[in-house]
Image (spheres, rainbow, N blue to C red):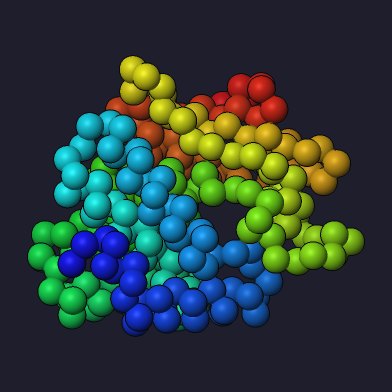
Amino acid sequence: MTFQELVKNKSVRTYIQRADESLVALGYTEHSFAHVTHVAKTAGYILETLGFDEHTVETAQIAGYLHDIGNLVNRVEHSQSGAVMAFRILNDLGFPVEDIATIVTAIGNHDEGTGVPVNAVAAALILADKADVRRSRVRNRDISKFDIHDRVNYSVTDSKLEISPDHSTVTLVLSVDPAFSSVMDYFEIFLHRMIFCRKAAEKLGMRFTLVINGQSLI
């Protein structure tokens, strides 16, 4: 089964939708199809740009698409529960054991609290997931009731992950509207994620940098 076929799978789509519904109830930002599709495409872009073969790129895309299904079980340790779910789904769909192992490992290691970029697919998934900061992820439309996560995501008017031509650096470039959030707010909630991105970049032989409003901060 290809990545495009997996995206159309009714059961997989149901798991993603229901997992996001759980996060809606908890007040989290969007973790539905927009997020997982973005992460899948970005993870694929990273490995394709670095010269990995097509099969590895597609494996990263699948890991990206499935990475948050563990939220269906519980937000706590969702990476581990998501890895177990992914194993069952992919095994039932007849995926090769080698691919299942790689994807399960990547999903189980994508959270900054417990994860480690143990292989290239895991590293690409980490970078793609943590770089998805954008205004459209905020569900709460009442600005007066924004928490810090809402403010930070809403303040980001543009975000992109760029790999330098010589493949030495991967940069998260953000445009932030200070009317809604300060740069310090960003670091308050995302510092551990940025450290995690640095480790993921190093696994891929690159340096991670963060640029906000034209200023290099990491």
Q: Is residue 128 left or right of residue 178?
A: left
Residue at the location (44% across, 66% down)? 68
Picture quarter containing residue 81?
Answer: bottom left
Q: Which quadrant, please, contains the N terminus?
A: bottom left
Asked if 209 appears above or below 64 in the picture, the reply is: above
Asked if 30 appears above or below 56 in the picture, the reply is: below
Seen from this angle, which residue lies furthest right?
144
Residue at the location (59% across, 39% down)? 159
Q: Is residue 56 left or right of residue 164?
A: left
For the question of whether residue 173 can be seen, the reply is yes
Picture quarter containing residue 165?
Answer: top left
Q: Which quadrant, please, contains the C terminus?
A: top right
For the question of whether residue 118 can be seen, the reply is no
Q: Is residue 160 left or right of residue 16?
A: right
Asked if 20 appears above or below 212 in the picture, the reply is: below
Q: Position of residue 188 (x, y in %)?
A: 69, 45
Q: Position of residue 116 (x, y in %)?
A: 35, 49
Q: Position of residue 87 (x, y in %)?
A: 24, 72
Q: Position of residue 118 (x, y in %)?
A: 27, 47
Residue at the location (40% across, 76% down)? 13
Viewer-nearest residue: 29 or 107: 29
Residue at the location (10% across, 65% down)? 96
Count of numbered badges drawn on the protein: 0
Asked if 46 appears above or below 140 in the picture, the reply is: above
Viewer-nearest residue: 12 or 76: 12
